[in-house]
DNA sequence: AAGTGGTCTAGACCACTTT
DNA sequence: AAGTGGTCTAGACCACTTC
């Protein structure tokens, strides 16, 4: 939520809302590229003061500006963002600085660079992204996504625990979904999902069932809510009667319990999900590095 | 294992084994910084030939060279590597190119930069690194590492499955370790570990029990084998009688099964590990991004 | 041919740490 | 004060894609 971080010399509100720093726009690199002193009388003495309360490098500020444009939908998922040269001109910084900002956005998987083509906003429609958020891999053969069967989709008031995780108040509106995922015709995942009510008005079981493809792609396309990060807490639990029946296993069968909180821009939590995975013919893949 | 990749213009064997490219070493940036043209008569026409069979950017070659020095132990875990300027002089490239190489090594967690101090080889003695390889977090309180009780440590011939994962032949020598990890005085992890026999001559239960600290730190310090990456396959399983007894749970209790393969330099597997985690008061933490 | 991202260089200055 | 990594710039050229 923080807007432009204050920078000792590089930032100071000037006229243009797009311009980041009041730097000398001339091609000649002046003696003080960082911080155009508004007091031209003492050009050399001015910028030494103020040892910077909250220093933020230029490229971080550019990154924040680009992220803001992503959030507001100026550049939508799947679209190309302006070229590095264009962004450099827009923000009045060098191409190298824009480059470094985009480097970080690419590392965060918010955008993807394609040489010769441009830089594109990532989307949950891509195969690559799917595997980032569903790490269940079959023992044999390639990952394959079966159909999602929605059992339930209703609005209700958030229980205390869910509200806490979503950073809302107990009783605030949430949407609850329950569904079963089949992998090669075997019930493999039972999901219980809570979504921020405010962000998902009009979400129904029909919409979910009609949708072919990842649920997050639907959220992104129809509700303008893009999941960009998640944390998971994984445990082994025993199947209760309900889960056992829905997953066609014996009660007491060990299941992987995956509690996920997903975040959108600004690190705002928008989804809590509790998945129960049958791991007899699949496993949860993780890489440590 | 691949040595210096061939590069169209930037690479060609010259005298110095350290020098990467036969570029003009003069301080004056010549008209052709890429590929010093020996024929100054036709400056624009020369370098177009040879469309590069296996192109590899300079900084990748530098990265490989630095990694080689890490592997051979020229710079040991915990030590500082030469400054960017020194490395630039050594490899006869610009500081910016060295910088980019180190950037990637830092992203891979092979080195860590510390502003004002230098760049240091990472080590498993650091707290930060521990959490990269042991992701079990208590429900309440801070992560705390209890003592490791070694049940067994013996040499044996690799079973087929282990041999396959370690990329050796069935029957080749391996070291097998079994141990229990206590977290705040509760048995929480039961590990069964297989190590490449060739790399761990002289490893005994005594050495393991005397060692205070992470096992990987011992491997790194005493056996020159540094784990830099691992993959894990996670499942939920039921405790058998042996595991139940050692972990003080009822037989049949759901446990997290974590099958890990760890790799050292050159992506060579050196360890296979099967852990059984009690997840009643702890959970496996994972971040998706 | 033109436009995109990717690499490489050189030099300036800043921030941090140690001497 | 000196040395380290961190930021920023400007310009050149390369590789890939599209027109």
Image (cartoon, coloured by chain):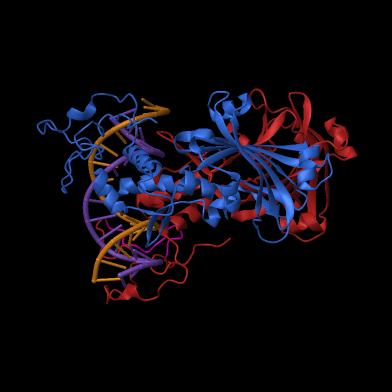
Chain colours: A red, B blue, C purple, D orange
Magenta stretch bounds: A15-26
Is residue A152 something that shows in the picture? yes
* Residue A259 percent across, percent down from the top left: 73, 47
Q: Is residue B214 magenta?
A: no
Q: Quadrant of residue B155?
A: top right
Residue at the image position 45 percent from the left and 55 percent from the top: A62
* Residue A141 percent across, percent down from the top left: 65, 22
Which residue in the rendered view is the most extreme toward the right? A241
Residue at the image position 15 percent from the left and 48 percent from the top: B28
* Residue A13 percent across, percent down from the top left: 44, 67
**A127 is higher (above) or lower (below) than B93:** above
Is residue A72 something that shows in the picture? no
Q: Front-most of A182 and A153?
A: A182
Q: Is residue A23 magenta?
A: yes
- Quadrant in the picture for the N terminus of chain B: top left
Q: Main secondary structure of the magenta part?
A: loop
- Quadrant in the picture for the C terminus of chain B: top right
Q: How many marks?
A: 0
* A198 with respect to B122 (left or right): right
* A287 with respect to A114 (left or right): right
**C1 is higher (above) or lower (below) than B277:** above
* Residue A157 percent across, percent down from the top left: 83, 54
Q: Front-most of A103 and B60?
A: B60
Q: Front-most of A147 and B4?
A: B4
Residue at the image position 9 percent from the left and 31 percent from the top: B41
Q: Front-most of B112 and B226?
A: B226
* B10 with respect to B162 (left or right): left
* A73 with respect to A29 (left or right): right
């Amino acid at each position: 939520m923080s807007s432009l971080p204050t920078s000792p010399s590089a930032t100071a509100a000037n006229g243009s809302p797009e311009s980041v720093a009041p730097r000398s726009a001339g091609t000649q690199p002046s003696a003080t590229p960082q911080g155009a002193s508004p007091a031209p009388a003492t050009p050399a003495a001015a910028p030494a003061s103020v040892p910077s309360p909250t220093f933020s490098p230029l490229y971080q500020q550019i990154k924040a500006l680009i992220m803001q444009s992503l959030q507001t939908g100026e550049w939508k998922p799947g679209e190309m963002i302006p070229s590095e040269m264009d962004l450099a001109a827009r923000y009045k910084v060098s191409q190298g600085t824009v480059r470094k900002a985009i480097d970080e956005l690419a590392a965060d998987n918010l955008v993807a660079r394609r040489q010769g083509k441009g830089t594109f906003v990532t989307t949950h429609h891509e195969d690559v992204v799917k595997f980032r958020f569903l790490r269940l891999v079959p023992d044999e053969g390639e990952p394959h996504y079966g159909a999602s069967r929605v059992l339930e989709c209703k609005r209700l008031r958030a229980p205390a625990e869910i509200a806490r995780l979503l950073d809302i108040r107990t009783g605030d509106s949430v949407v609850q979904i329950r569904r079963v995922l089949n992998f090669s015709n075997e019930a493999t995942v039972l999901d219980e999902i809570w979504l921020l009510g405010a962000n998902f008005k009009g979400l129904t079981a029909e919409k979910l069932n009609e949708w072919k493809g990842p649920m997050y792609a639907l959220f992104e396309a129809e509700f303008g809510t893009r999941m960009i990060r998640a944390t998971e807490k994984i445990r082994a639990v025993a199947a209760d009667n309900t889960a056992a029946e829905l997953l066609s296993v014996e009660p007491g069968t060990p299941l992987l319990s995956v509690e996920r909180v997903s975040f959108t821009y600004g690190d705002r939590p928008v989804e809590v999900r509790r998945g129960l995975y049958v791991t007899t013919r699949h496993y949860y893949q993780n890489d440590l590095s």
